[in-house]
Amino acid sequence: MESRKVGHVSRPQEPSAPSRLRRLAVAGVAGLLMTSLTGCSDLVERGFLPKGVTSTSEEFTTFWNTTWLWALGVGVLVWGLTLWCVVRYRRRKTDTGLPAQMQYNVPIEILYTVVPVLMVAVLFGKTVELDNTVLDTSKKPDVTINVVGKQWSWDFNYVEAGVYDSGVQAHLNGKKGVPATLPTLYLPVDKRTEFVLTARDVIHSFWVPQFLQKMDMMPGRVNKFQVTPTETGTFTGKCAELCGAYHSEMLFQVKVVPQAEYDQHVAALKARGQSGFLSNSLNRSELVPGEQQFLPPALDQSSIVEEGKK
């Protein structure tokens, strides 16, 4: 009797759940990397910040991006460890009762304490270092502007030029031509400008987004910072501190222009009779004792005019 061997056809074994999860994770990371590398643009490279137009813009952008990269690194590590624990220590069908319990793990607890403290210390140190750089006003400015915030507009005293400009509140009615009605601050390109900030009434905040820098204007106080605009153009500014009913209409423009055009604007203000300065005595609150020293010497009572008068 002839015997035959019956062949056995084996089916490929399906990958286990951990294997599938690992493949999905690798595919996800690869897709994220491909998207990041192929989708880079100027906006992404500067961390979705506005395009900076001052000499310190690069420092702000670098600090911002570095901080987010470190935060992303920590996030990826935490997400990865969490996913690994979910997969590695998941409950299986064959498990009974509770898994082995651990009360503590001294090395890991020390690691999880020391590393965050070091990270916060480094971030704090770099923040202070950047602040000291961008808030340094020890250098002599080429141009000094006393910017005065008021509900709900802006006044500008051009200190060296001895002229002023006074703004009125914008009216956002949805019609064209609103930018032409906004108070406009002129600055010469590539010249160090010092902003001396005071407030007529409540707390305001002087903010030009493309300067990547802003500062509060406190009643009774004098704040200041310096920037050097490196690009010509017209940039939008606004109050960044909720200051009342028409806060949203407290807008202004900054025109960064060549020196010759800046001189023409100063001459035009003089021709309109806007010589002298608008008095800080118009403020509701008097300056706190000791704050007067932070105002430019030119802003004394002998050279100040009342608003709207010669």
Image (cartoon, rainbow, N blue to C red):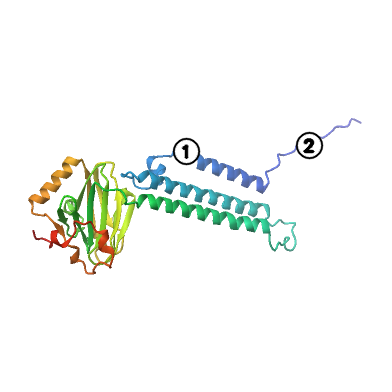
The kind of residue tagged 2 is His
Q: Earlier in the sequence, mark 1 or mark 2?
A: 2
Q: Is residue 34 left or right of residue 213?
A: right
Residue 304 in sight here: no
Q: Nearer the viewer, residue 43 or 103?
A: 103
Q: How many numbered marks are there?
A: 2
Residue 108, image quadrant: bottom right
Residue 155, image quadrant: bottom left
| Above-or-below relation of 282 to 177 | below
The C terminus sits in image quarter? bottom left
The kind of residue tagged 1 is Leu
| Above-or-below relation of 104 to 59 | below
| Residue 37 numbered mark, or none | 1
Q: Residue at x 84, y 33 (%)?
A: 5
Q: Nearer the viewer, residue 136 or 171?
A: 136
Graded by Cα atoms within 10 Å as few (under 14), some (14 to 19) or many (20 or more), the crowding at tag 1 reads few
| Above-or-below relation of 23 to 162 | above
Q: Could you say where residue 303 lies in the image, as x and y percent from the top left?
A: 13, 58
Q: Secondary structure at mark 2?
A: loop
| Residue 8 numbered mark, or none | 2
Mark 1 → mark 2, Cα distance in angstroms: 49 Å
Q: Nearer the viewer, residue 198 or 155?
A: 198
Q: Is residue 79 left or right of residue 69?
A: right
The N terminus sits in image quarter? top right
Q: Could you say where residue 184 lies in the image, as x and y percent from the top left?
A: 19, 51
Graded by Cα atoms within 10 Å as few (under 14), some (14 to 19) or many (20 or more), the crowding at tag 2 reads few
Q: Could you say where residue 11 lies in the image, as x and y percent from the top left?
A: 72, 39
